Image: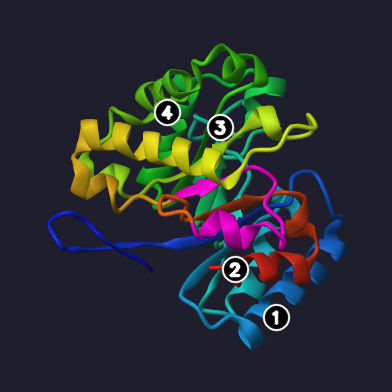
């Protein structure tokens, strides 16, 4: 847990989380090798109370979930799911299917899904509801483009994503959601988001959540950084008071790098 202290001197215990998003990488055998390596290194080296999540392509989920049973720190998540429970939706995967293979988390609203598949805040609100109903923990992604960042409207834009997809939830429900902030403007653009910029946005999001759900609830919600965290910058990022871990892309495809990031708290 990430132990902090609130103004009322009550300890705040947020989960420290490092989630790996494999994206569309690794064939079946490569994926199983990666999962096995992650589990073994975590069991041998990770002493801290950190939750490690592998979000693999759908083809790996069942077997990766079996591998994860060998560690009490490693869990499995899907990279997306449908807002429908079942039916004629070719190519889609339901919350029930994800749950049935042993996964416990699901990424929702990743910037690539929003951009390439035109996923909307309204769709994502429905997916959040279905995930929670099925007992899955949503990793809800939010973030802004370079154009929005340069216009100075980044905070209002990202907060609107929370409003439209999460603010219908109850206090109990929102505490079951993990939020991941993606500085889309700093991913593959040559621009770099500093640890202070990450902290500033995370703090703004937590304050915004507190305005809707109360400070005590907001203080319990883990907010992950999704901006290209690597072994050489993770420690500085994770030292920020409102950064509770990372949603890791490329570095999650190398077991050693991924676990080194998890060891950076």
Q: Which residue is mark 4?
A: 126
For the magenta stretch, what is the residue range? 223-239
Which mark lies nearer to you, 4 or 1?
A: 1
Relative side of 81 to 1, left or right: right
Q: x, y (%) of residue 216?
A: 20, 49
Q: How many marks?
A: 4
Q: Residue at 69% of width from left, 33% of height from top?
A: 186
Q: Earlier in the sequence, mark 1 or mark 2?
A: 1
Q: Is 213 rendered above or below residue 234?
A: above
Q: Which residue is mark 3?
A: 109
Q: Residue at 54% of width from left, 38% of height from top?
A: 197
Q: Residue at 55% of width from left, 62% of height from top?
A: 102
Q: Which residue is mark 2?
A: 264
Give the structural element (helix, strand or loop) at label 4.
helix
Give the structural element (helix, strand or loop) at label 2.
loop
Q: Are marks 4 and 3 in contact (CB under 8 Å)?
A: no
Relative side of 231 to 182, left or right: right
Q: Say whether residue 112 is visible.
A: no
Query: Mark 1 to mark 2: distance in Å?
Result: 14 Å
Q: Is residue 225 within the magenta segment?
A: yes
Scheme by which the image is coloured: rainbow
Categorize mark 3 by other alpha carbons within 10 Å: few (<14), some (14-19), many (20+).
many
Q: Earlier in the sequence, mark 1 or mark 3?
A: 1
Query: Mark 2 to mark 3: distance in Å?
Result: 26 Å
Q: Closest to the observer: 248 or 63? A: 248
Q: Is 90 rendered above or below residue 4?
A: above
Query: Mark 4 to mark 3: distance in Å?
Result: 11 Å
Which mark lies nearer to you, 2 or 3?
A: 2
């Amino acid at each position: 847990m990430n132990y902090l202290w609130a103004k009322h001197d009550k300890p705040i215990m947020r989960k420290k989380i490092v989630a790996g998003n494999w994206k569309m990488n690794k064939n079946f055998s490569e994926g199983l090798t990666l999962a096995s390596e992650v589990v073994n290194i975590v069991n041998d080296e990770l002493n801290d109370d950190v939750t490690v999540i592998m979000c693999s392509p759908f083809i790996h989920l069942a077997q990766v979930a079996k591998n994860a049973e060998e560690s009490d720190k490693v869990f499995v998540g899907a990279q997306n799911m449908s807002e429908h429970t079942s039916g004629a939706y070719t190519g889609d995967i339901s919350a029930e299917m994800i749950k049935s293979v042993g996964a416990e988390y699901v990424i929702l609203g990743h910037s690539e899904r929003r951009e390439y598949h035109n996923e909307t805040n309204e769709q994502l609100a429905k997916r959040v509801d279905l995930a929670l109903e099925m007992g899955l923990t949503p990793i809800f992604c939010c973030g802004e483009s370079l154009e929005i960042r340069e216009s100075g409207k980044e905070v209002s834009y990202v907060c609107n994503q929370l409003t439209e997809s999460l603010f219908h939830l109850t206090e109990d429900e929102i505490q079951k959601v993990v939020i991941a902030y993606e500085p889309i403007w700093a991913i593959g653009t040559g621009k770099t988001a500093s640890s202070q910029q990450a902290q500033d946005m995370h703090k703004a999001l937590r304050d915004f959540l507190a305005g809707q759900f109360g400070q005590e609830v907001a203080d319990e919600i883990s907010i992950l950084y999704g901006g290209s965290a690597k072994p050489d910058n993770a420690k500085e990022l994770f030292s920020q008071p409102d950064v509770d871990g990372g949603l890791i892309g490329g570095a999650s495809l190398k077991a050693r790098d991924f676990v080194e990031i998890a060891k950076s708290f």
